[in-house]
Image (cartoon, coloured by chain):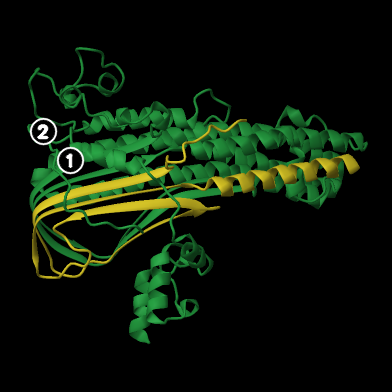
């Protein structure tokens, strides 16, 4: 089977979220963590755009006319997939040889 | 994670799109509403001039049209816009996981996913407009799995080599076939786990939006709920498709059983016609070969059970009441095709609100997926079963990551765990 030549820039999974708010006030310092993960190996990237909102917000402070946009994506690594396919081909050859010997 | 602060971003929001993308839109410009029509009518029978209000209103907004056709996602969850006048939101330890998984025997185990963790969050917001978009493309993963299955089809010895030598007709062969049964079963289970998770995860996320938004968002929440239901159903259909594919794999296992039966028959023991039915073949094998081959029969039975469970899982995932009637036979409809249908249904249900921000979102999300410079740290984090952020925090705090107990998914060490370790130190 010939795998389609996938565009290097096309992700297997993409997530995006955007929000704007007239007023925003955090009562506590928020904790947020986003992690892309996968196997055998993935390539990932994310991008954040903020307007009127700092990276580290201050609890109790009111932020106005806030815009936040976050996008991220991940895909299986081409190199890792090639290695995986080579491993399988190698196992297939080994199995064939074993079968012929027996 | 790359971060960038931008303050020069221009607004391209169109006017006159204040209505949400809910299919329960109250617009009555043509006397029809989406909610009044049957599922069949809404989903499949819309033709020119008979489109829903939302479809006409948001005709020019279709996320998938923004991309080259070959890049269209197989699963699309698009929440075009959620508007809330005022909200007080409190969250405590919210974890969301979205993953695409594929496993074939012990040969391939592919996973691509994202974990989102929100610790305690307490916030007051006024005048909110929010959008969300999730795209999943199965083509890459499907191509890898397809290639592997083709390799296995051409080299059935590959399956045999995963267990003990086939000449060992006794327990060794039994284990081999048992393993094959389990593995084929895992294909179905893995897909069954992965695809509903997309629907469930989206359902939870949208559910949170719906819960917090109150009456103003109620309509949107309902619409989004329907969309998520569509995604869930689609995932079920996709699972059915995968189940069918796995059914074909079971068919290959049947052939393998048949081959083994022939081998045994050549040994003069007379296994009988293995192709005449797995259970029947197992019984005959047990009768004909005594104790050692009895194990073979048992393992053949396991293959049958695995196939039965797999078919049942496929049927159940498809949303039918009679899950046990799932058909493991190879079908012409593939999971990606079904998922694409689902994506279209979901997009229509949501109404695809015309939001330039959402368009930008889709485009931005589709653009560059580069190799991060943090690859090395990720690898180290993977080795220590910790998140990259947790790894970084541990290094900065001087905490030995090996001494931290993980509380994340599958015992993974998160930032929260490291912070706790720092506090306890």
Q: Reading the chain from its start, which is encountered first: label 1 or label 2?
A: 2
Name the residue at the bottom extreme: B425
Residue B239 circle label = none
Name the residue at the right extreme: B268
Instruction: Give chain A's shade.
Output: yellow
Q: Residue at (84%, 33%) from the top-left corner?
A: B262
Q: Residue at (43%, 62%) from the top-left corner?
A: B409
Read off the residue under disc 1. Answer: B81
The spot of residue A29 in percent (x, y) is 20, 70
Residue B123 in which image quadrant:
bottom left
The spot of residue B64 in percent (x, y) is 32, 30
Q: Residues within 10 Å of mark 2 (few under 14, many from 20)?
A: some
Nearer to us in this view, B400 or B297: B400
Instruction: Give chain B's shade.
Output: green
Read off the residue under disc 2. Answer: B17
Q: In this orientation, does residue B207 appear?
A: yes
Report whether A64 appears left or right of B371. left
């Amino acid at each position: 089977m010939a795998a389609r030549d996938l565009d290097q820039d096309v992700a297997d999974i993409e997530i995006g979220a955007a929000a704007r708010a007239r007023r925003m006030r955090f009562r506590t310092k928020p904790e947020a963590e986003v992690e892309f993960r996968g196997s055998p190996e993935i390539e990932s990237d994310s991008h954040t755009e903020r307007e009127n909102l700092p990276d580290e917000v201050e609890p109790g402070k009111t932020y106005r006319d806030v815009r936040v946009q976050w996008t991220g994506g991940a895909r299986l690594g081409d190199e890792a997939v090639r290695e995986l396919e080579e491993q399988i081909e190698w196992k297939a050859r080994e199995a064939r040889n074993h079968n012929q010997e027996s | 994670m790359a971060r960038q602060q931008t303050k020069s971003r221009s607004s391209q929001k169109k006017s006159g799109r204040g209505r949400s993308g809910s299919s329960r839109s109250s617009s009555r410009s043509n006397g029809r509403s989406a909610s009044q029509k049957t599922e069949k009518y809404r989903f499949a029978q819309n033709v020119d001039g008979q489109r829903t209000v939302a479809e006409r209103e948001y005709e020019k907004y279709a996320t998938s049209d923004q991309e080259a056709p070959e890049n269209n996602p197989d699963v699309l969850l698009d929440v075009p816009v959620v508007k809330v006048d005022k909200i007080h939101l409190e969250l405590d330890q919210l974890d969301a996981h979205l993953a695409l998984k594929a496993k074939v025997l012990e040969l391939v185990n592919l996973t691509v996913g994202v974990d989102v963790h929100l610790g305690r969050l307490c916030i007051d917001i006024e005048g909110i407009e929010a959008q969300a978009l999730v795209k999943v493309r199965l083509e890459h993963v499907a191509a890898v799995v397809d290639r592997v299955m083709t390799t296995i089809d051409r080299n059935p010895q590959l399956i045999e080599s995963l267990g003990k030598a086939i000449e060992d007709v006794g327990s060794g062969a039994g284990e081999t076939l048992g393993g094959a049964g389990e593995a084929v079963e895992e294909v179905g289970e893995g897909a069954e786990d992965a695809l509903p998770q997309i629907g469930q995860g989206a359902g939870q996320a949208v559910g949170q939006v719906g819960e917090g938004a109150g009456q103003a968002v109620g309509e949107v929440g309902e619409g989004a709920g329907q969309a998520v239901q569509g995604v869930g159903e689609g995932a079920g259909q996709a699972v059915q498709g995968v189940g069918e594919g796995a059914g074909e794999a079971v068919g290959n296992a049947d052939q393998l059983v048949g081959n083994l039966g022939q081998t045994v028959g050549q040994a003069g023991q007379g296994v009988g016609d293995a192709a005449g039915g797995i259970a029947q073949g197992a019984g005959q094998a047990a009768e004909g070969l005594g104790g050692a081959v009895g194990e073979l029969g048992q393992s053949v039975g396991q293959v049958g059970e695995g196939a039965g469970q797999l078919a049942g899982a496929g049927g159940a995932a498809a949303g039918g009441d009679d899950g046990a009637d799932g058909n493991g036979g190879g079908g012409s409809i593939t999971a990606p095709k079904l998922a694409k249908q689902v994506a279209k249904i979901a997009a229509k249900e949501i109404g695809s609100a015309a939001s330039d921000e959402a368009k930008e979102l889709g485009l931005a999300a589709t653009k560059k997926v580069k190799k991060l410079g943090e690859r090395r740290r990720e690898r180290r984090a993977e080795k220590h079963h910790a998140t990259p952020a947790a790894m970084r925090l541990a290094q900065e705090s001087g905490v030995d990551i090996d001494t931290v107990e993980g509380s994340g998914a599958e015992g993974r060490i998160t930032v929260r765990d490291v912070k706790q370790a720092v506090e306890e130190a």
